[in-house]
Amino acid sequence: MNSAVQVFRIRPMTAADLDRVIEIAESLKQAPQWPRRVYEAAVSGLASPPRIALVAQDAATRTVAGLAVASFTPPEAELETIVVAAAFQRLGAARRLMVALSRELREKRISDLLLEVRVSNRSAQTLYGSLGFIEAGWRPGYYAEPVEDALVMRLRLI
């Protein structure tokens, strides 16, 4: 997708999105490779802890371009995944997902959003920093394949 202006509609993930969501995750080695039942629980509203699951849908083609899932246990939430299909990367989908997710968490009176990011993933760290996240810690050896440390980042929501 090389359009000058990419428009994404951010909406709740539904069961009808799951094939595409799994396809996106499987196409990206850095994405968590969750079994379908994890996504099913997230969209069913029966997940414990509860989750917010959103998708970014390309407005022109109606193709799901990316997704974000966060779990929450007040007063905190954790970003569990945010991934964007390769064809839609660097077009603003991740930023739009994060803004919408933050808004939904604020509505639920969540005060802080935490996430882990690979120390080598400078582009993600730059995005998170531009959204107001700050460094909050370090998790040695957190990631596998390859083993890598994680930077913990925190966003104060309210």
Image (cartoon, rainbow, N blue to C red):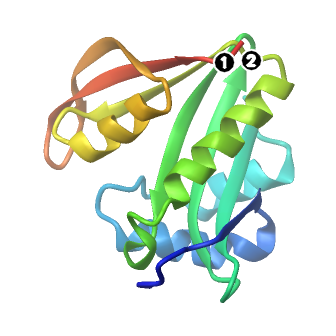
Q: Note whether residue 15 is visible.
A: yes
Taking the spot 70% from the left edge, 25% from the top edge, the residue there is 72
Image height check: is 139 above or below 25? Answer: above
Give the percent coordinates (x, y) of residue 49. Answer: 72, 29
Give the percent coordinates (x, y) of residue 144. Answer: 22, 42
Provide the secondary structure element on which disc 1 rests.
Answer: loop
Q: Which mark is residue 110?
A: 2
- Residue placed most toward the observer, 29 or 100: 100
- Mark 2–mark 1 distance (CA, rounded to whole Å): 7 Å
What's the amino acid at mark 1? Leu
Residue designated by label 1? 157
- In the image, taking residue 94 as reference, residue 140 lies left or right, namely left
Image height check: is 17 above or below 77? Answer: below
Give the percent coordinates (x, y) of residue 84. Answer: 47, 64
- Residue placed most toward the observer, 26 or 38: 26
Q: Note whether residue 34 is visible.
A: no
